[in-house]
Amino acid sequence: MIAEINFLNEWIPEQMGPGTIFILENAGEIGEESDPYWAVLSCPSCATLGLITRKQIAGLIPVICGSDKCSAQFHICNNDIVPRKPS
């Protein structure tokens, strides 16, 4: 699993390697009002793309990979990816 986030300034899906994040142009306008979608993140383990929310970027709730073949769970903490500890 990649340990650091890489920010992408332009939406170029081919450049979304593991741990790459792209902040949406309409960040905060889509999704639930209390926790809207904020960015697209490439899973740091398998590179599957998925939308993440403002609370996930802030590290308040974990990110869970949406791939059928990956079970990565992690927090974002100061631009680092921290694997979620088993409960």
Image (cartoon, rainbow, N blue to C red):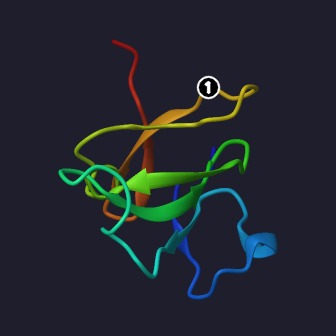
Percent position (x, y) of residue 67?
Answer: 69, 34
Tell me the crowding category of disc 1: few under 14, some 14 to 19, or many 20 or more residues within 10 angstroms, Cα based.
few
- The answer to which of 68 and 44 lies nearer the viewer is 68
Percent position (x, y) of residue 7?
Answer: 53, 76
Measuring 29% from the left and 58% from the top, which residue is drawn there?
54
Query: In the picture, which quadrant includes the N terminus?
Result: top right
- Identify the residue position indicated by label 1 in the image: 71
Name the outermost residue toward the right.
14
Percent position (x, y) of residue 73?
Answer: 49, 32
Percent position (x, y) of residue 33?
Answer: 21, 54
Element type at marker 1?
loop
| Depicted 9 relative to depicted 67: above or below | below
Numbered marks: total: 1
Query: In the picture, which quadrant includes the C terminus?
Result: top left
- The answer to which of 58 and 68 lies nearer the viewer is 68
Image-quadrant location for residue 68: top right
Measuring 31% from the left and 63% from the top, which residue is drawn there?
78
Name the outermost residue toward the left.
34
Image-quadrant location for residue 36: bottom left
For the residue marked with disc 1, what is the amino acid?
A: Ser
Q: State left or right for residue 24 relative to residue 72.
A: left
Q: State left or right for residue 35 relative to residue 87.
A: left
| Depicted 85 relative to depicted 3: above or below | above
| Depicted 77 relative to depicted 12: above or below | above
Name the outermost residue toward the top.
87
- The answer to which of 29 and 23 lies nearer the viewer is 29
Measuring 37% from the left and 72% from the top, which residue is drawn there?
27
